Amino acid sequence: MSWLKSIASSAAVAAALAGAAMTVSVANAEDTIKVGVLHSLSGTMAISETTLKDTILFMIDEQNKKGGVLGKKLEAVVVDPASNWPLFAEKARELIQKDKVAVVFGCWTSVSRKSVLPVFKELNSILFYPVQYEGEESERNVFYTGAAPNQQAIPAVDYLMSKDGGEVKRWVLAGTDYVYPRTTNKILEAYLKAKGVAPEDIMINYTPFGHSDWQSIVADIKKFGSAGKKTAVVSTINGDANVPFYKELGNQGIKATDIPVVAFSVGEEELAGLDAKPLVGHLAAWNYFESIKNPANSEFIKKWQEYTKNPKRTTNDPMEASVIGFSAWVKAVEKAGTTDPDKVIDTLPGIETPNLTGGIAKVLPNHHITKPVFIGEIKADGQFDVVWKTKDLVPGAAWSAYLEGSKDLVADWVTLKCGNYNSVTKKCGG
Amino acid sequence: MLKSIAAAIRRLSLTIVAIVAVTIVQPVLAADIDGTIQLLTTDGYSDTIEAIGQLSTSGHPRALAIVQALSDGKLQFSDSAKKVYIDTGAGLVDAATGDAVATPPADVSDVRQNNRVRGVVQAALGALSLFNPDPQKRREAAEAVFKSRDENALPAIDASLAKETVPEVATALKIARAAIVLFKSDAAEADRVVAAQAIQVAGTQDAVALLRSLPADAPKTVVNTAQASAKTIENNLALWSTAQNAWYGLSLGSVLLLAAIGLAITFGVMGIINMAHGEMVMLGAYVTFMVQEVIRNHFPSLFDLSLPIAIPLAFIVSGLVGVAIERTVIRWLYGRPLDTLLATWGISLALQQLVRTTFGANNREVGSPSWMSGSFQLGQLSITWGRMWIIVFALVVFAGLILILKKTPLGLQMRAVTQNRSMASAMGIPTPWIDALTFGLGCGIAGIAGVALSQIDNVSPNLGQGYIIDSFMVVVFGGVGNLWGTLVGAMTLGIVNKFLEPVAGAVLGKILVLVAIILFIQKRPRGLFALKGRAVEA
Amino acid sequence: MITSFLLGGLDRKTGIAILVLALIGIGVTYSNAFLADASPLHVSTGNMLLFGKYAAYALLAVALDLVWGYCGILSLGHGAFFALGGYAMGMYLMRQIGTRGVYANPILPDFMVFLNWKELPFTWVFFDHFPYAMLMVLLIPGLLAFVFGWFAFRSRVTGVYLSIITQAMTYALLLAFFRNDMGFGGNNGLTDFKDVVGYNIQADSTRRVLFALTVGFLAVGLWLASSIVNSKLGKVLIAIRDAESRTRFIGYRVAEYKTVVFTVSACMAGVAGALYVPQVGIINPSEFSPANSIEAVIWVAVGGRGTLVGAIIGAVAVNWGKTWFTGVLPEFWLFALGALFVAGPLLLPKGIVGTLGGLFSFGNRPSRVVPTSPEPAE
């Protein structure tokens, strides 16, 4: 019977632990609307996602000061999926089934989104996904408030080809080997070739996650860049690998005036982690910059810094996307008069909410939103100086016209009720 | 863009020619630069470029100061007052007059630059510096002319060449001159051929690019000579690239050595599977960050000394944490190496989270002191200072550790305790304290590795995780318990990796290295430098 | 002979454990299917999926305990066999999607269309056949373990050297599977499965079957491992663990024994992976990460090395703790988990089962858990 006893005693230990843990969770019996926050607070992605958790908590705090939604207070349910993809799915299920949240704000990496997708579809809940991503997706239960490739990558390349951007003729597409860079580079390659760039003027390079030794690759870029044509690097290098990459660029003396680097994953948060002086002039393409002068933005930054009690706390693009997602959801709930997922999903397309740069973010039938595109140059203080922006708002496209498999696909959840309608075969995919 | 730079340089060089030709006794009559100033207040890049051009031709005494201020990012403007100011740090001065401004208007903001403006400013300043008293500046100026190869700079180059005494600068000037002549369509064909040959001396990738970009309508002999020159340089560069790869390999090897060397003590010598090793490295990096924070806020002049200050502090902090871990946890687990794995894994999780809650999950900024920034040329080898110092540092740490173990009483006692604990104890060695000190030493060395790694990697709570697997790999590959094995192992892995990378790509290269390690261990089941004798089998 | 081999495995401890597993398997599926949601005994589908995941982990832990606890082979790469089994299953499930993918391509999985691939790589060809896929679940991890073990054990790579090269193996596989060029979906891995052998994978009934299968396989795995351990083969394994050279000198072919048990263990890990994938709905390269394999070792250590049943308890306890902590203490759960790992070896040096088994030792002889060797590892 030793075995049964061992179970009994381990259960006792566990119960004691659980009891201790219970005291932490807030006993909240009053009528609230629960909002799930599914961002990694530990592991490799904590570096990026922790800020987004704080943003949602901040927005909930602000909303509650205004009296909440539908007369009820909002209550955040924060969990830690720990940068572990199967755990994302498990936690999503926990939030929806156990905690009964009305909506979830979360995920950063594509794989985490892919991991939770079946859960959201099965349990019919709503996910707001706030990060720039590779596109090629439009799901009924997901709203994509970050940039699709046509809202970030293509305008950036257009800028570099313009006179102000330096009339670049030769391109290095450098990225981390995962789906976002792969797709973005595929789209860019097709786009550049369509613009008459010769194949030998395009160099594509992939590196693993967290790559930290960039000596050879930076030397290669330098070599590629000395062919007598103006060269630029389009970087889809992810998160952690950026700091050593930029440090190596600085050390090998590649200045922005020689070979500019335009990045899609480097924002104010990342620059706060390194000495920006050698990087002055390198570029980033985003839909929001902290330095954009605008009353809405200034007020947001002020309140955010008050909330975090840190006068140096930066803001960045995925934060703005979270903010837009949150206010769009609040508006939709108020319009629909309920938090019922089906009603909210149907109400969301068409909802307009001001973004932080003076424009209007409109939720489109394909569950993406309209965004302005800005190109910023890195300044010595780690902020960006906006050197170019699109004249109009760019609507997010779920399916890229430059990819073989997706050029015929259309996403429309209002009239077609389909995320991948094939306009040639006139059929809705699976 | 090239055209606008060239235009600006052309104007500048005219000025320079004027200055060189006529020794000016009295300042040029202050030309009217009000219009130029107006251009700088419109907040448009094209206007700013136009203004730089006008300034350089104006011969105005303030022209250089204004361009310099723009280059330093200290030029400001006011839209309301339609005036431009230079921020001297102590207050604003009027750019046009140099007079201090007591009450600047409220709407003062920086004159903005993009890469196009920066290019024009750099080229302009470069060309101006052809007569700088500092030879280094003159050389840079010559290189700037080489890049812009503006025909109008020719007289200035010739004048500068005539006076030049420093051989390196003279060479740079000659190459710059050759570049101009090569592209000068109205130059004599023979001169251009000579120029194409002369550029070969430069031997750089840039020179190849220049030679290859000769327009197709140039005379055939010139083009052929240029192609031949380019080919020669390329062959030469191919040889150098082997040396360059070896250098990269050494540099990667030194990073691996630094990361692994502390583990060679705690794991190699003591037999503790120390999964918290990476976190000791991380703590060292965070100590560097804190030292730099204090220096930035209180003693900015000492910034270049931040790393020498951080090294002992990192050693102490990580070392003390190590001693604390040994005293509270590990000492109960001697003889149970797998339990040390479990416990140190737990410690590593907790330490990561501790740092995350204290400093936040974001990267922290650790700057490079000036002596670790930039690079220098050794032949065609481009060597970055930071990497070079890291190699030196890794070797110094290694030598220091060997000295401690072999030449100090403490080292003797450490070796005695790890080789035969009971006998050492019988000889009166306080074994518990030696254990604590040995573990502390290993952790402390991991801490100073963190100081070096903070220079090339993210300073984030995940820093240590990135190195832990590689560190174990290095120690085991070299042979557990043998410090020399760790040195040779780290360098071998670094160099092999860097020679594979250009052929197979970064990912495949790394996979091949791992497979090679697996196969190597089959051949030598106890690593590169195996300990021999019966003790091994115990 | 086989009967006596299997009956030998049914010692008291294993018997009770198998009985408990059977009760859990039947009880949970029954409760999920027939009890009302409001009933306090009702097990929600979410929780059943969670238990199913734990059971798959537990099978991995049993496989690991078989080689580590009884043969002294500390594999820091068992996660690789688990993941390979998972990938084999995942590939089958991907092929089952058919035209229901977003690009509606009848042959190619979505991620291949996405990367403009034109035809199916040879590695994927027969994976639309269930028996073939199941064969691969066993064969791929088994073959890798056999080849790896054959070379390593013949070269007498032991102790920490073996541990580190198994880690190198899983790390190399991690990097390889990350590569999109490999054709296994890169970082995103395989996901968005629709059905398994014709049944909707999201239906509660399919999930009940999957859960029951997982618990069943866990019981079978435990029985098999226990049979091996209690047989003559098991005695040799323990002899190898405790004194490898001596066993060799007596005349046993140590390398062959080790290779066999390593291969069997890898196959069990592969099955665990194959059961894990349909329940969590995704398989991606992070399953290969060395940290996962180390975690598996920790489950075994927490539960009690060399007890088999302890491996199950350890895997469930640690993972349940993780689920719990990440929900209630999102900001501080790592402290709690870290403290657990530090306190474990200090307070329960032989793991939960080892320690408690020692306290109330009647019936079973407590296995020798911790050799007092001065060497870094065994």
Image (cartoon, rainbow, N blue to C red):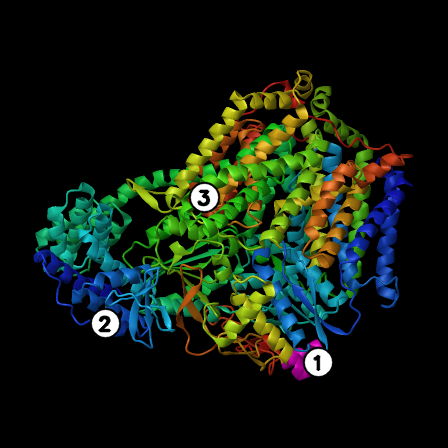
Separation of residues labelled 1 and 2 (CA atoms) = 60 Å
Q: Disc 1 marks which amino acid?
A: Leu
In the rendered image, the vertical position of residue A360 relative to residue A161, given as above or below = below
Outermost residue, front side: B102
Task: Name the residue that disc number 1 marks.
Answer: A70
Residue B127 horizontal/vertical position (percent): 20, 56
Q: Main secondary structure of the magenta part?
A: helix
Query: What separation in Å lies between label 3 and label 1 (alpha carbons)?
Result: 56 Å
User: What segment carries the magenta color?
Assistant: A332-347
Q: Is residue C257 left or right of residue A249?
A: right
Magenta stretch: includes residue A344:
yes
Quadrant position of the C terminus of chain A in the picture: bottom right
User: Alpha carbon of mark 2 to alpha carbon of mark 3: how far?
Assistant: 44 Å
Q: Respond whether the residues carrying marks 1 and 2 are from the same subunit.
A: no
Closer to the eye: label 1 or 2: 2
Task: Categorize mark 3 by other alpha carbons within 10 Å: few (<14), some (14-19), many (20+).
Answer: many
Could you tell whether C290 is left or right of A176 in the image?
right
Check the residue under mark 2 and report the chain it is in.
B
Visible residue check, residue C157: no
Say what secondary structure mark 1 lies in. Answer: loop
Tag of residue B36: 2
Kind of residue at badge 2: Thr
Q: Amino acid at mark 3?
A: Ser
In the image, residue B255 lies at what x, y percent?
A: 48, 39
Front one among A58 and B151 = A58
Chain of the residue under the numbered disc 3 shown in the image: B
Q: Position of residue B235 (x, y in %)?
A: 27, 43
